[in-house]
Amino acid sequence: MKEYEPVIGLEVHLHLNTKSKAFCSCSTVFGAEPNTQTCPVCLGLPGSLPVVNIKMIEYAIRVAIALNCAIQKFTKFDRKNYFYPDLPKNYQISQYDLPISTGGYLEIGSGESLKRVGITRVHMEEDAGKLIHQDQNSAVDYNRAGVPLLEIVSEPEISSPEEAYSYLNCLKSLIEYLDVSDCDMEKGSLRCDANISLRPKGEKKLGIKTELKNMNSFKGVKDALSYEIKRQSALLESGEELMQETRLWDQKEMKTFAMRTKEGAKDYRYFPEPDLLPFVIEDGFVNRIKET
């Protein structure tokens, strides 16, 4: 690693502990019998219409304020289109070009000093269901479909697996203090994807990035990033080209393996969610949340 330096950005997905789902009144309680907390809305049945859970917006603003983000006056939801068995509508209601907040930061411990890591955006979306793999078969539990999520996206300003570990611990402590999520990774309440690339030391241009998924602990994130640094540096030193791709972390083998080539925004065919009006966030609403 004498010649290269890692550039890391983290995407944290956070279950909000609202009593009902993002766009319907179904319960979000964890551990219920499969497919007992569903309705036509979160199952994506024809003719069903979403209604926004105002608590989700309140919690999103609470987190954005704590992360020093700018709250947008005008925000909307969008459709992110892709097919997967646990996504019954074949699209996810998310936010694309007008997220609820942008441009914050989180201070973390880095060695003996503090480091400020930029926050690109905090936006709202709904979760998908859960696939359960059994021998040669797979089952789907839609209880989680429609549970409100926050996605917290950092700038690519993290320089090592150890800094990534520190960032996640600081963020988890902040979220627990705000009382908007239980942050339980075993339940899937907090999940993290990591983007990592290498570049020659002193270079400003970013290298080809890899997205890492399937990491179910902060230690797993640190281990996966450490492995990926070794893998990418070996490829670069041998003169091979890196591909932009998504890779899965295998905890037993302690290595990553290719899942798919990385999609871009155009692959998801984003467009404004036609069943939900845009929102104007009033200063009074934000100020009342700040006071808490």
Image (cartoon, grey):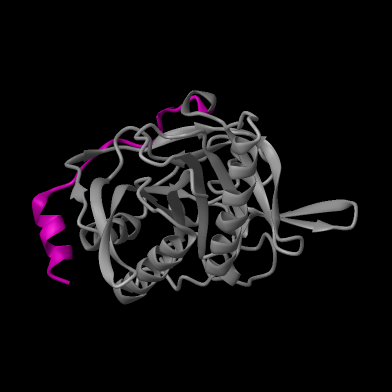
Reply above or below: 230 against 251.
above
Residue segment shown in magenta: 268-292
Q: Is residue 276 magenta?
A: yes
User: x and y percent of residue 277 in the render?
Assistant: 31, 35
Residue 179 visible in the current orientation: yes
218 or 4, nearer to the observer: 4
221 or 18, nearer to the observer: 221
159 or 290, nearer to the observer: 159
Q: Residue at x 53, y 46 (%)?
A: 41
User: x and y percent of residue 53 in the render?
Assistant: 36, 55
From the viewer's perspective, is 107 left or right of 42? left
User: x and y percent of residue 30 in the render?
Assistant: 57, 71
Q: Residue at x 36, y 74 (%)?
A: 173
From the viewer's perspective, is 103 left or right of 174? left
Q: Residue at x 76, y 64 (%)?
A: 252
From the viewer's perspective, is 176 left or right of 81? left
Q: Is residue 63 magenta?
A: no
